[in-house]
Image: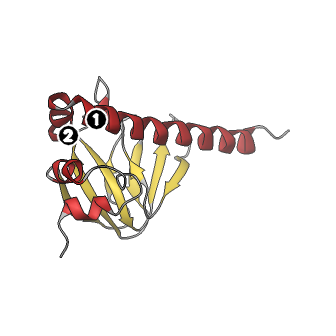
Amino acid sequence: MKDIGHIISEHAFFSDLPERYCKLIGGCGKAEVFEPGQFLFKTGNKATQFFLVRHGQVALELHAPGKDVFRFQTIGHGGIVGWSWLFPPFTYMFDARAIEQTRVVTFDGLCLRGKCEEDHELGYRVIKRFANVMSRRLVETRLQLIDVYGRE
């Protein structure tokens, strides 16, 4: 079985990082499996982790009082889920739920934040990657909202 550092070095999100950084980041990760319907995290919980989806699908969902659950995005193989571990108040802003059996690498955010504080070059590279994910996710969600609510 491959170690986590090797797994992430083959993933697009981490692939161009120097091997030493993949090993450092890999030291904060572990392989996990989520069954259908199981939550990776829930709105309002302390944000301590992020997830690299290796297989399966994760629904990103919002709840509003008196409304049905709104799935605003589905993340599949190769996707990254969770960035709230990076920014105060370190609280998840939506739910992430496995739609089918989903294999992930779960990363300890406190561990990785500590490594980023010790090595600012690593921190810069990590923040840049997450900013890209956040930007794409906001654009995709905006387009979905226009499609759903922009019709008359």
Q: Secondary structure at mark 2?
A: helix
Residue 9 is left or right of residue 77, and the answer is left
User: Which quadrant is the N terminus positioned in?
Assistant: bottom left
Q: Residue at x 36, y 65 (%)?
A: 54
For the residue marked with disc 2, what is the amino acid?
Leu
**Is residue 58 visible to the viewer in this orientation of the structure?**
yes
Query: Which residue lies under the disc numbered 2?
Result: 112
Residue 35, image x and y in percent?
Answer: 32, 67
Q: Residue at x 26, y 37 (%)?
A: 122
User: Which quadrant is the C terminus positioned in?
Assistant: top right
Above/below status of 151 relative to 32: above
Marks 2 & 1, CB-CB < 8 Å contact: yes
For the residue marked with disc 1, what is the amino acid?
Trp
In three-dimensional space, the C-alpha distance between marks 2 and 1, rounded to whole angstroms, equals 9 Å
| Residue 33 vs residue 126, the one in the foreground | 126
Above/below status of 67 relative to 37: above
Residue 112, image x and y in percent?
Answer: 20, 40
Q: Residue at x 39, y 49 (%)?
A: 81
Q: Secondary structure at mark 1?
A: helix
Residue 113, disc: none
Q: Residue at x 21, y 33 (%)?
A: 116
Query: Which residue lies under the disc numbered 1?
Result: 85
